[in-house]
Amino acid sequence: MSDSQIIVGLEIGTSKVCVAVGEVSGSQAVNIIGLGQAKSRGVRKGEVIDVALAEEDVRNAIVEAEQVADVEIRSLYLGVTGSHVRGFNNTGVHPVVSADREITGDDIQDVIKNSKAINLPTDHSVVHVIRQHFRVDGQDGVLNPEGMLGAKIEVDVHVVSGRYNRLQNPIRLVNGLHMEVDDIASSALASSLAVLGTEQKELGTLVIDLGAGVTEYAVYSAGVINHTGALAVGGDHVSNDLAYGLKVPLARAEQIKIDHGSALIDPEARDLTIDLSDDSLIPGRQVNLGHLQKIMSMRLQETLELIAKDIGQAGLIEYLRAGVVLCGGGARIPNITKLARDVFNLPVAIGRSSTVSGVKNALDEPEFATPVGLIKFGAFQAQAAPRRAGFGRVIRRQVAALFGR
Amino acid sequence: MDVNPAIRLIGLGETGVKLVETLAVIAPEGVVAHSLDTDNRSLYRCHQSRTFLLGQAIPCGLGTGGDSALARAAVESDSDELAGIVDQADLVFIVAGMGGGTGTGAAPFLANLAKQAGALVVGVAATPFDCEGIQRCNQATGGLRDLKQVADAVFHFPNQDFIQLGDADIGLNQALEIANRHLCESVLGVSRMLLEPGILNVSFADLESLVRNRHSLGAVVHVEATGDDRTDDAVKKMLSHPAVRGGEMLKEANSLLVHISGAELTMAEMDTVTSAIGGCAPTARLVVGASERASGEAIQLTIVIAHTGTLAEMGDDTSSLKPDPAGKVSGLGFSDPYTAFSADSYLDLGTETGNSKRAGFAYTPPAPTADALPPECREDLIREAASEEPNRVKRRKIVQEMLPLEIVSKGRFENSEPTIHKGEDLDQPTYIRRGAILN
Ligand SMILES: Nc1nc2c(ncn2[C@@H]2O[C@H](COP(=O)(O)OP(=O)(O)OP(=O)(O)O)[C@@H](O)[C@H]2O)c(=O)[nH]1
Ligand SMILES: Nc1ncnc2c1ncn2[C@@H]1O[C@H](COP(=O)(O)OP(=O)(O)OP(=O)(O)O)[C@@H](O)[C@H]1O
Ligand SMILES: [Mg+2]
Ligand SMILES: [Mg+2]
């Protein structure tokens, strides 16, 4: 066990704070050895709005994970999300200057450096630069151009960026609890790493993480990440709509949603009612199940359609040969796969963290995709840049094609 | 080019942001509102104005905790973006609460940028209650002075004034609410006066000639009255307005801009107003404007009172407007001890951080006390304060009318950035936006 390494993933989510502890052995197999959770009170739409509350919730989740896994957590990989996080593609270009036109390691370094010269708004900073493919003299799909002959080398990258200060907020929170952030990763990326296998990435898949505050999505095709996005709309919006439409308190609406919710309208439910009299606060109150389903399905359909439109505009729908994979708490809504199938006209499945093993609980629940994915992200990172214990900077970062095949 | 002056309303710090958010809803069309703070939390609450976080690197959205030097460092690092905000503006209102870090530190710097961009700069500053402590009051005084030295005019609203209007046990919140309403009304009054067409037009040039480069410290008074005696009532209200300090302010004024608006305004009414004001302010230069655009039967008076500070003596074009000697003993008394600072001296303050206490800061303005007011006037003021309630209800109604879409409360998303996608507010329930009927 001496060569195994502990990697921790933290998601400060809108509904829950979740810490996953993984053990990575030399062979890159990830074993989840502990989970810690706390109800999240200081986060809206994926971003911390109340530092004191969020800090307390993170501390509680960490303590629980430490106890379960029997480790002391000193550093972790942190998921970041929010409406300010966006993804786009960029291309780096570099002329091969050597006399014999043979592409060297230096050329590859240079073209990658060039791809990172991105014109971001001044208040934005880069979260990821993920390598997709190289091109040599216009020839597509080159995996490793070193040693090839050519005059011009290009590299396509997917860039994820966010507002600097809004990325810093959760980092500072973690630092304030005397832990280091090994690196940050966008939640969309992390979740996709958790639920997708190699084949799905090759064939082309859209992953959607239906969270409480943010709905994130990522598209893979030909083995690499092609498109990411985040909509600051989620399960909280469903509950808020229900609270308003059914005239019940928000907490009650959340419960009704979990107990009776559905992504589709069942014509038979039109005249059915749900009795709320078990709630002493609202004696004798009833709500109409048809109304509930209508309000809920309209919100969910709109959310999925916004994503479909974005993917469509990027021209990626036809590349999704392995269909759509749903994760996040919203993946548990009854009939959500059916609704998504209607919207995307593609096969839809619920994501399971199939490529890691360990605490069974963590693998079965779609809402743990982000923290589990962060461990996989961390494992890739650690492999690319082995940890030097004690020398950690606040953020260690290696730009490489880590996620892909 | 647009015929109307380009007016920018910029709120700095929590107080400024709060006020600008309110103003943005009711301001006349064409006024562009910006909210600037070092604190994310206050910007998250903004839905009406354009927001900008000061100091992305430091303090990166966490506020200054009262450190005005930190705020100054933040605005200095953002000066390119800030210059963009004031670019092409004719008139810039800088609204801030003095005494905290952000408003105090950022307002003078921004005012200077706006001046350099060629705008007429009017500061609108609230200063703390006495009970907030001597240190905060001193910091506020310093900020006010720095602001005055760069801005063309600063309208000063001491919070303490409003507390003294009511009973001894008036709540702080209540006092702030009254203060905020006065602040908002004055900014609105001036904007309307410049933007709405009138029978006797007060133009931007009039305001400009009154305040440009005068660095005056003054007040804006805005009152409304209805009924048969609307003119007399309005004049009475105006004279009992806290900012007029029982007529004191008018007596010492160098110039006054009076704007009267009301439906079916008569010559007699205009005469009543101007002679009443003229009688109180014998030495002031008077500019009068009038407009018949008004809501309902109310008459509205907006009076810009300018005191020329001693700094103005340095400009030669203002020599004709030297304050008369008596004017120097104004209740505010800021000008004298601080004339030693040259116009750009505030720029040095940024480097003068750390342990060095700023030289001029030990001065606290004498808070105007209730005793200083003549008894009749105090009675009036108290009555005024007591009659605030119906007014407030009226204003709310107007806000509602102008925001027909704001039907659904933001509920859970009250304190977060709204999710706007292609102009649509996704926080509102989908079924409502799509017009679905539940039956
Ligand atoms: N008129 C008025 N004054 C206020 C209000 N809220 C606060 N103040 C005053 O404004 C002063 C400055 O406070 P803030 O605006 O919160 O400070 P800030 O500029 O955000 O500064 P930091 O938070 O320290 O960076 C306070 O000392 C109060 O006296 C308000 O609603 N109305
Ligand atoms: N059975 C269910 N039916 C309907 N909604 C559900 C169900 N189970 C969970 N949810 C919803 O899923 C959401 C929580 O999902 P998740 O745990 O993925 O969010 P999060 O990670 O905390 O939030 P985010 O990633 O947006 O910050 C909540 O809004 C919850 O109401
Ligand atoms: Mg999540
Ligand atoms: Mg503040």
Image (tube, rainbow, N blue to C red):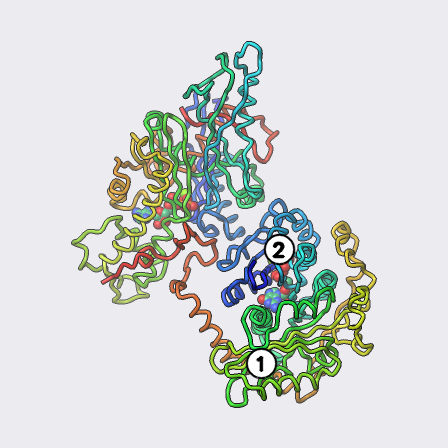
Write down the chain letter for disc 2.
Answer: B
Give residue B374's position: percent from left, percent from top: 70, 87
- Between residue B4 and residue A23, name the one nearer to us: B4
Q: Residues within 10 Å of mark 2 (few under 14, many from 20)?
A: many
Q: Residue at x 71, y 78 (%)?
A: B249
Count all numbered tags in the image, as a single digit.
2
Give the left or right position of residue A72, taking residue B328 as reference.
left
Q: Secondary structure at mark 1?
A: helix
Q: Position of residue B41 (x, y in %)?
A: 54, 55
Where does label 1 land, which residue? B385
Q: Quadrant of residue A253?
A: bottom left
The residue lying furthest to the left in this view is A268
Classify mark 1 as within 8 Å of ligand 1 or not, answering yes or no.
no
Q: Secondary structure at mark 2?
A: helix
Disc 1 crowd, CA 10 A, few/some/many (<14, 14-19, 20+): some
Which label's residue is closer to the chain start, 1 or 2?
2
Residues flagged by tags 1 and 2 on a common chain = yes
Please indicate whether residue B373 sits to the left or right of residue B329 in the image.
Answer: left
Q: Is residue B238 above or below residue A329?
A: below
Vertical placement of residue A11 versus A5, above or below: below
Residue B125 on image: x %, y %: 65, 66
**Dot 1 amino acid type:** Ala
Decide: is B1 above or below A361: below
Residue labelled with disc 2: B86
